[in-house]
Amino acid sequence: MSDLDRVLATIDADLDAALERLFATMRLKSISTDPAYAGETRACAEWHARDLAGIGFDAGVRDTAGHPMVVGHHRAGTGPSALFYGHYDVQPVDPLELWDADPFDPKLVTRADGSKMIVGRGSADDKGQLMTFVEACRAWKTVTGGLPIPVSVLLEGEEESGGVNLPPFLDANLEELRADHAFICDTNMWDKDTPAITTSLRGLCGEEIVVHAASRDLHSGFYGSAAANPNHILARIIADLRDADGRITLPGFYDGVPELPEHLRESWAKLGFSEAEFLGEVGLSVPAGEKGRSVLEMTWSRPTCEVNGMGGGYQGAGFKTVIPAQAMAKISFRLVFDQDPARVRASFREHVNARLPKDCSVEFHEHGSGRAVAFDTSGAVFQRTQGALTNEWNKDAAFIGGGGSIPVTTLIKDKLGVDVVMVGFGLTDDAIHSPNEKYDLRSFHKGIRSWARILGALAG
Amino acid sequence: MSDLDRVLATIDADLDAALERLFATMRLKSISTDPAYAGETRACAEWHARDLAGIGFDAGVRDTAGHPMVVGHHRAGTGPSALFYGHYDVQPVDPLELWDADPFDPKLVTRADGSKMIVGRGSADDKGQLMTFVEACRAWKTVTGGLPIPVSVLLEGEEESGGVNLPPFLDANLEELRADHAFICDTNMWDKDTPAITTSLRGLCGEEIVVHAASRDLHSGFYGSAAANPNHILARIIADLRDADGRITLPGFYDGVPELPEHLRESWAKLGFSEAEFLGEVGLSVPAGEKGRSVLEMTWSRPTCEVNGMGGGYQGAGFKTVIPAQAMAKISFRLVFDQDPARVRASFREHVNARLPKDCSVEFHEHGSGRAVAFDTSGAVFQRTQGALTNEWNKDAAFIGGGGSIPVTTLIKDKLGVDVVMVGFGLTDDAIHSPNEKYDLRSFHKGIRSWARILGALAG
């Protein structure tokens, strides 16, 4: 029996204990965007540092201007070194009433078909995913007393809230974190049977605006029409962001956005993606974006503009005839290829200012900024990772595009000078960022086994 | 010394006690739109019934399908009978953090210039106003043992929440409530020195829409562009409600809206209204409505469309890259002349449905419906009321238009067949429906004296 076989057997035997460890971190409410949870976010970082130390990592919590990082090194061994990145913070849980159970009381739920899923905030994004890597390390350590290659782990606590402290942290610790390869586990499989390596990600430009009109809320019967209504101003700003064909109207927005290269178009066409199924799974049927583009293009290679939140005036039960003093919107742009987040932000702010009556004002708040990224998959690390995944899942691992944004990918590539291999075991129905977030037990179990194989393959 | 002089002297001497009574009702959280306050709303009704009984009214709380009515009769005496209407319910108090003090702990606050104001929810809308009438009755009763004319009082508990139970209540009690004249105290003075009788009011059509798209909240990185975003749909619906000239675009909306009659235009021009001051008082300077219309036209004789509340997606601190499953808006139309609320509602719903993607749905909720109303001021009751007001304030009482909607006015006219005299002592800076609502102590004091004079004049 090879070391790898014994490692895989250990993973199978240890699954219940691995689940208990995952539940322990999921119980910690590490909602990074809400200052009320700062203490519990730190407690979560400390939990992970202790957990890594228990596997033999030289691990600790590292302060930043915001939530802390967790850094651990297991430098023994030969072969190419690997830096693994994950994030231990989670999204807020509102609207709480749409959860079937307490989001911070994780549970294993059995479906009608007998399959099981881990339910709770952070199950898929990203605690369940990051623990697949950690558990793979634990199994190697248990079986062989070491890891196949030198490994460093970096866990961020602000991935869901802008991550402004990550760039200075990387700058300040470049030598310590440098490695031959970088891995991130925060992406999806192609489908529940097909593993995938995500080789491109979109960038992000997040912006919040608050439109101010009157100095106080007004009675709409007395001031209606005469007084500027921030709800109307905001609606105009948002409505004007897209034209009738679904194109984003900001001047220069599509600069640096080429048509999809033919080889990618062909490769994606072979994936057998069903737009009807993709939308049907969430109760929709009509692609809402740019006319004449496929859904895969819309979500992988075209830039988007989405209003993630907006609000103004009375939203409670009943009715209140008020003209609010202010209204707000949180808007994010997903960027592709060479789009520059700073230029997009400037263009958006001009768009807003041009629609603002002279007696109103607007506040702008920046929420996240990152360029798109894409990797050449011909290198050995991509090929070995792909081979390990194919062995575990008995199905060819796919190279795919990603619609989301993981700014750390760009940062690691730019600052550490290495390509980033994004391997994840999430599924599209995991409901990350939503009520009833889940992670299939199969994703967790075979995810651990996958990383065990990848670590072995990199040493070989 | 005449009876009236002794009544006025009693009012002056009794002011502190009258204030204590007002504070007692203001402490009761009669927020009719929020079911959580149903018990306290009823307690407020009971307080008013007891208070009226204490003055000698045959008074009681009368159940409806919603919050109860308070009805009291003081039928002794001769002369024309009067029905007085007020409402004991109040608006919600959010956003609570913008209040300088507990909205339900009323206080007398002294300004830098020595003048005083009553601060708290309901001070002006409508508890302070309705108590001016009740206190005038109390003073007449104290001095003369009776009232100058037969008086009935009807206090509603759902004026701020649609008032759907008022029409059936009036229908069921027509004979009991019938009177020669009707009075409402829920309007403003022209300015702080000039009393006013409001002779026209706009109608209202209130509508709430909830746009539904996906079956759950989605991650905007995975579904952006491809999935319909209810925030965008709502923004388009709202933005399209007005054209570039500020006109409302609903087909047929301006049917039944004539140009202002010349004599009203002239009469209003004489009021010396300053648009700059009106808007400047709330920090604005640019009339936002229909181009080429004066602010008085916009707020008194032109219909409006205002979004009183809207919301969708994540509105908390930080950022959440979500595409929400739904988004909502509360929209009210103020109606004038012969506009039909039912036709406006139907036209609005067509407007919404026409902008709804095929895979989305919308819920419509009706919130209030009433036609505009206008009275001929040449009748004796208007002239006598005007004279009494002029005597109290030493300044000619003005006949003015009103921008708000008091559906009961139309109901009383239609069902009881009498004109309604709307006299109120509110000021534009009372901040009704807003944080830090106040009622000038002078409005309260001279308001009581005004009603004492009006009651006397009607008997004379």
Image (cartoon, coloured by chain):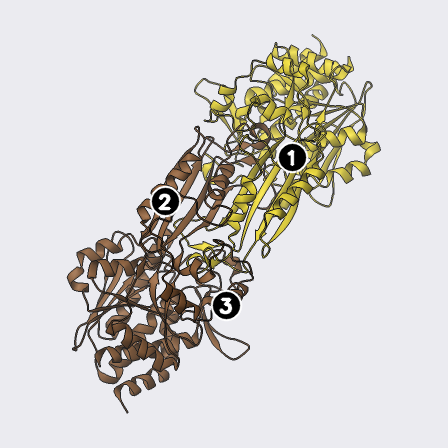
Chain colours: A brown, B yellow
- Give coordinates of residue A246: x percent, y percent: 48, 50
Farthest top residue in view = B1
* B189 on left or right of A37: right
Q: CA distance from mark 2 to mark 1?
A: 57 Å
Farthest bottom residue in view = A1
| Residue that numbered label 1 is attached to | B88
* B368 on left or right of A271: right
- Give coordinates of residue B330: x percent, y percent: 58, 42
Q: CA distance from mark 3 to mark 1?
A: 59 Å
Please rate how many residues cluster around mark 1, counting C-alpha atoms within 10 Å: few if below 14, some from 14 to 19, many from 20: many
Q: CA distance from mark 3 to mark 2?
A: 32 Å
Q: Amino acid at mark 2?
A: Gly
Residue found 26% across the figure and 82% down from its top: A142
| Residue that numbered label 3 is attached to | A274
Q: Amino acid at mark 3?
A: Ser
Asked if A416 appears above or below A128 in the picture, the reply is above
